[in-house]
Image: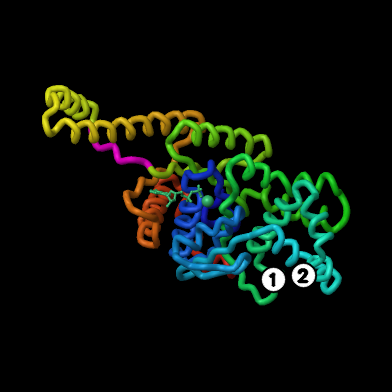
Amino acid sequence: MPALLDRRLIFVTGKGGVGKSTVATALGLVAARRGLRTIVAELASQSRVTRTFERESAPFEEVELAERLYAISIDPQSAMEEYLRVKTGAVGQALGSSRLFGALAMATPGMRELLSIGKAWELAQLERRTEGAGAYDLVIVDSPATGHGAGLLRTPRSFAEMARVGPIAHQAQAIATTIADPGFTAVVAVTTAEEMPVNETLWLAGELAEQQLSLETTIVNALYPPRFSAAEAEALTRARDRAGGAAGEAALETVLAQHGRSEAQREQLARLCEGLAQSAIELPFLFCDRIGPRELELLADALRSGLERHGLEPGVPAADRRDGG
Ligand SMILES: Nc1ncnc2c1ncn2[C@@H]1O[C@H](COP(=O)(O)OP(=O)(O)O)[C@@H](O)[C@H]1O
Ligand SMILES: [Mg+2]
C-alpha cells in the first residue's frame, strides 16, 4: 500500500463542524511542504479553506494559498459549464448557458454530485482538460458531511451502471475506476472525540467496506490535552471539596471540568479505535480566536508526525513521481 501522500486523490470526510476543512487544508500543507503541488478542492462551496488564509476567490478559480498549495471551490453549475465547453465546444457552450438545459441537467438525481466529483477527478489528471491549467501531484477533496460524502463516492459507479453506454457512462466509469484504485485514491475520516461524530465515523467505515473501499486512516481533531493522572485528579477533587466556598474552589472546579472533558474524549477515542480496529491520528485542540495560517502550520506539524507514526509517511519524493508519470 503506498503512503497516503503518494496517492493523487484523497477524500476527506466527516461530520459537519468537526474540522474537516481545517484538517484537509493542514494535510494540503503537509503535502506542499513535501514538494507536492497540491490543491484542496472544497465541494460544499463554503469557501472555508481560502478564508483561513484570508483570501477571496471567485468560485471555480484555482487560487494559491501558500507555496505549492492551491484551493478551489467547486460548484456543480461551473463544473457543468466547463465540462460542456471542453467536451462539446460551441454547442456545449450554448447548452451550458441555456437555463432550461441547466435546470434539467441539475434535476437529474446525482448529476450535481457527478459533476462535482468529475471536476475533482479532472484536477487529479496529469493531462488537464482545462485549458492552460497546470498538473497537480495531489488533490485533496474537502467532501460534504459523512452521509453525503459516502454517497458522493458511490455516484460515478451508479451512473456508469445506469447509463451503460454514451459519454456520461464512459466518463462516470473512468471516475469510478479511479476511485476504486487504492493506488490512486484514499478516503480519510475526520472526527472529534465525541459520541455523534464517532458514531458517524464507525458508520462510514462500514459504508465504505460495502462499496469495496477502505477507510485509510482516521484523524481525531481538537483533543484536549490530558493534564492530570487519575491520582492527581483525585487530589484535586479532595482539594475542591475541602475548599468549601474559599477563593480556590471555582478555579479547582474549572480545572476539574477540563479534566472531565479530556477524560470523556479519551473514552470516545478508545471506542472509536476499538470499533475501527485501528489507531487514529490525534490533533490537539488549539486555544485561539481563529485558526489562521500560523495555527494551520501547527496542525500540519502534528499531522505529519501522526502520519509518520502510522507508517503513512514518507513516500516517494515528489520529483520522482512526476517524472515517472
Ligand atoms: N484543532 C482545532 N482547534 C481549535 N479549533 C479548531 C480546530 N479545528 C477546527 N477548528 C475550528 O472549528 C471550526 C470548524 O472547523 P471547520 O474546519 O470549518 O469544520 P468543518 O469543515 O468540519 O465544518 C472552525 O471555526 C475552525 O477554525
Ligand atoms: Mg467545511
Give the percent coordinates (x, y) of residue 23.
47, 51
Judge the density around disc 2: few (<14), some (14-19), many (≥20) Cα neighbours within 10 Å.
Answer: some
Q: Which residues lie in the magenta part?
A: 223-228
Give the percent coordinates (x, y) of residue 124.
63, 61
Q: Which residue is mark 2?
A: 86
Residue beneath the point at 58% across and 46% down = 187
Is residue 67 visible to us here?
Answer: yes
Judge the density around disc 1: few (<14), some (14-19), many (≥20) Cα neighbours within 10 Å.
Answer: some
Is residue 315 visible to us here?
Answer: no
Instruction: Name the side, left or right, on which 109 lies relative to 23.
Output: right
Q: Between disc 2 and disc 1, whose residue precedes?
A: 2
Q: Does dot 2 land on a helix, a strand or a loop?
A: helix
**In the image, residue 93 above or below residue 167:** below
Quadrant of the rendering where the C terminus is positioned: bottom right
Classify residue 60 by image quadrant.
bottom right
Residue beneath the point at 44% across and 42% down = 220
Q: From the viewer's side, name the closer residue of 160 and 127.
A: 160
As drawn, the residue found furthest toward the front would be 245
Q: From the viewer's side, name the closer residue of 202 and 250.
A: 250
Q: Which residue is mark 1?
A: 130
Instruction: Name the side, left or right, on which 49 lies relative to 264.
Output: right
Type of residue at label 1? Thr
Type of residue at label 2? Val
Residue beneath the point at 19% across and 35% down = 251
Instruction: Name the side, left or right, on which 285 lies relative to 131.
Output: left
Give the percent coordinates (x, y) of residue 163.
85, 49
**In the image, residue 142 above or below residue 212:** below
How far apart, in angstroms, are the residues tagged by discs 2 and 1?
A: 7 Å
Q: Pointer 2 and pointer 1: residues touching (CB < 8 Å)?
A: yes
